[in-house]
Image (cartoon, rainbow, N blue to C red):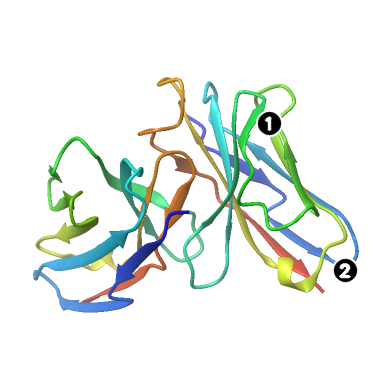
């Protein structure tokens, strides 16, 4: 079946602009995660949702970053007033969430959105 | 929060030999330890994972061991093949995962 999809795949923006990154999880997956991956590094956790509820946003770097999942399916990660240091690959992952939480759930990653802030 | 250390950063082995990648973690609350393989230009793909209630798991040429007392876990790949060349990440956590910095595995023909 279809995997996790993300759009756009590439985004170039000017410093100070807002950007919105979209994630479409695997159909039926309850849990959705956002990660950021710098070149040559492992993914860094940002936030995650069970259904529409944001469970943990401790990884969001600052208040310019926000995420939502209003209907418990598609999620949007928004970065306001972008800065050059925000340039990275932003990855979304989803998991079944059948355990009632996210412990021990396999996370499937999408292809990512490459963000470049000039 | 959780801190995951991964070694080595680069590993070169002859085709057919074994490769071992090691990780340590700091948070005793972590109970899930997946390993991901990432090829150039692609997202991480799960290759094997282990839960905290078992010490070892094997899937064909790939095995993972977990020592919860020492807070370390390892990936073992036997009979390596050219297609095993990639970057491998370990991770630990209970909800959001904390990843290691990755190991670039190079299989020499």
- From the viewer's perspective, is B36 left or right of B13? right
Query: Closest to the observer: B108 or A39?
Result: A39
Can residue A73 be seen by looking at this rendering? yes
Q: Label 1: state its secondary structure.
A: loop
- SS of the residue at dot 2? loop
Q: CA distance from mark 2 to mark 1?
A: 26 Å
**Residue A44 image position (x, y, % from top left):** 54, 57
Q: Residue at x 16, y 68 (%)?
A: B19
Q: Whole-percent x and y of residue A63?
A: 79, 52
Residue at 42% across, 58% down: B99
Q: Write down the quadrant of residue A64 in the picture.
A: bottom right
Q: Is residue B42 left or right of residue B54?
A: right
- Labelled disc at residue A14: 2
Which residue position holds label 1?
A: A74
Q: Kindly check if marks 2 and 1 are in contact, taking CB atoms under 8 A apart as contact.
A: no
Q: Quadrant of residue B38?
A: bottom left
- In primary-sequence order, the first of circles 2 and 1 is 2
């Amino acid at each position: 079946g279809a995997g996790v999809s993300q759009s756009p795949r590439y985004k170039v923006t000017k410093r100070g602009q807002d950007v919105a990154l979209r994630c479409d999880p695997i159909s039926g997956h309850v849990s959705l995660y956002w990660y950021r991956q710098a070149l040559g590094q492992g993914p860094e956790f940002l936030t995650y949702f069970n259904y529409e509820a944001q469970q943990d946003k401790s990884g969001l770097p600052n208040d310019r970053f926000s995420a939502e999942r209003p209907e418990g399916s598609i999620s949007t990660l928004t970065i306001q007033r972008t800065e050059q240091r925000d340039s990275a690959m932003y990855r979304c992952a989803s998991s079944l969430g059948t355990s009632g939480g996210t412990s021990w759930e396999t996370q499937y990653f999408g292809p990512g959105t490459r963000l470049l802030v000039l | 929060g959780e801190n995951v250390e991964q070694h080595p950063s680069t590993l070169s082995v002859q085709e057919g030999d074994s490769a071992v990648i090691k990780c340590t973690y700091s948070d005793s609350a972590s109970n899930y330890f997946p390993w991901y393989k990432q090829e150039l230009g692609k997202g991480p793909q799960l290759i094997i994972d282990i839960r905290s209630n078992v010490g070892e798991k094997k899937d064909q040429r790939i095995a993972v061991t977990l020592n919860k007392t020492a807070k370390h876990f390892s990936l073992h790949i036997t009979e390596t093949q050219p297609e095993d060349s990639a970057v491998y990440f370990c991770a630990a956590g209970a909800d959001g995962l904390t990843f290691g910095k990755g190991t670039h595995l190079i299989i020499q023909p």
